[in-house]
Amino acid sequence: MFYKGVIVMKVNLNVLDTEKINEDSINIDIMDTKNILNIINNEDKKVALAVEKVIPYIENLINLAYEKMLLGGRIIYIGAGTSGRLGVLDASECPPTYGVDPSLVQGLIAGGYSALLKAKEGAEDSLTLAKEDLKNIYLNKNDTVIGLAASGRTPYVIGGLDYAHEIGALTGAISCVHSSEIGNHADVSIEALVGPEVITGSTRMKSGSAQKMILNMISTSLMIKLGKVYHNLMVDVQPTNEKLVERAKTIIAASGKCTIDEASKYLIESDYNVKVAICMVLTKENKEVCKEILNKENGNISKALRNIMD
């Protein structure tokens, strides 16, 4: 089938978990505000339990993606609508939080970045547009492509996963339905079954929350494994504004068990490199020596400092 010049596929939405009617919210249109909120809150409580059930699949995808990243690979999220926006959001938060290059974790949304604010009609129905988007970022076999679709059937995502598989990249799929179509096109399928939405079909709600939680797990776990965390502190934070400078001082003080004033001194001496500053506090070595210590472990501060301190 063709629609505005692109190949599209048809699907019966009635069979999808995300499109079923929620009997618990059937009368939400005549409820008062308190009861509306209680209904939404009670449904939201189901999300974490649904995610808990798929942790083994999330773990598998993370471990496989990490091996790819050690070879120089990137994480690429692809999706449409809410799912696409969540992928772009998670990717965009990695550089300021963990100090990684913006290219390491990327989000592609059907219709391009302008679709973040305004839906692009027909873009998600294309089986070919994602291939072009992935070609534009020079997707290669060391990359991991993670398709996001609450409904589990978005053509844009399917086309992207097929192209990624074609060139040998790792593929993952995150959906909120049984036996998802995108799962059939991925190496690892994650299906967080949150049940019918409070408002039928409004997958920005429970399904969106589940996808956001899973993306948090994926990116956070990968950053930990890459050495961007020391104990439970995000030591690669980039002190690019006043708030982040203060956060950096707090992290240095907590890691080195020193005062905020001492942390400030080390932060300045390290040229505002938080990991180097922490190393200086704990080892009493100068900036250059600490850079060498970290470089030996490819910037993995946890490995570098634990080897020295143990």
Image (cartoon, rainbow, N blue to C red):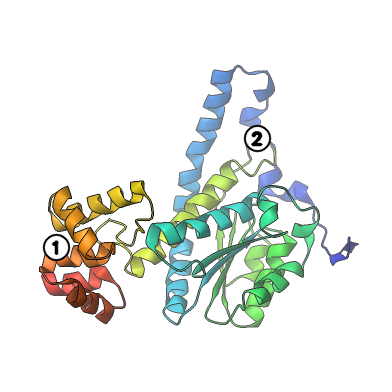
Image quarter hosting the N terminus: bottom right
The residue at 54%/35% (across/down) is: 43
Image quarter for residue 287? bottom left
- Disc 2 crowd, CA 10 A, few/some/many (<14, 14-19, 20+): some
The residue at 66%/81% (across/down) is: 166
Give the label on residue 22, or none: 2
The residue at 18%/53% (across/down) is: 253
Residue 27 in sight here? no
Where residue 68 appears, as percent x and y from the top left, is 47, 78
Give SS at disc 1.
helix
Q: Which residue is mark 1?
A: 281
Does residue 60 sit above or below 80 in this rendering?
below
**Kind of residue at disc 2:** Asn
User: Of the residues tagged 1 and 2, which is closer to the observer?
Assistant: 1
Where residue 208 appears, as percent x and y from the top left, is 58, 47
Image quarter hosting the C terminus: bottom left
Q: Is residue 256 left or right of residue 66?
A: left
Image quarter for residue 79? bottom right
Residue 233 in sight here? yes
Where residue 41 appears, as percent x and y from the top left, is 51, 31
- Disc 1 crowd, CA 10 A, few/some/many (<14, 14-19, 20+): many
Q: Is residue 20 left or right of residue 287?
A: right
Give SS at disc 2.
loop
The residue at 67%/47% (across/down) is: 117
Q: Is residue 65 left or right of residue 10?
A: left
Does residue 140 sit above or below 25 in this rendering?
below
**Kind of residue at disc 1:** Val
Q: Is residue 299 left or right of residue 19?
A: left
Which residue is nearer to you in this view: 163 or 43?
163
Where residue 176 appears, as percent x and y from the top left, is 60, 52
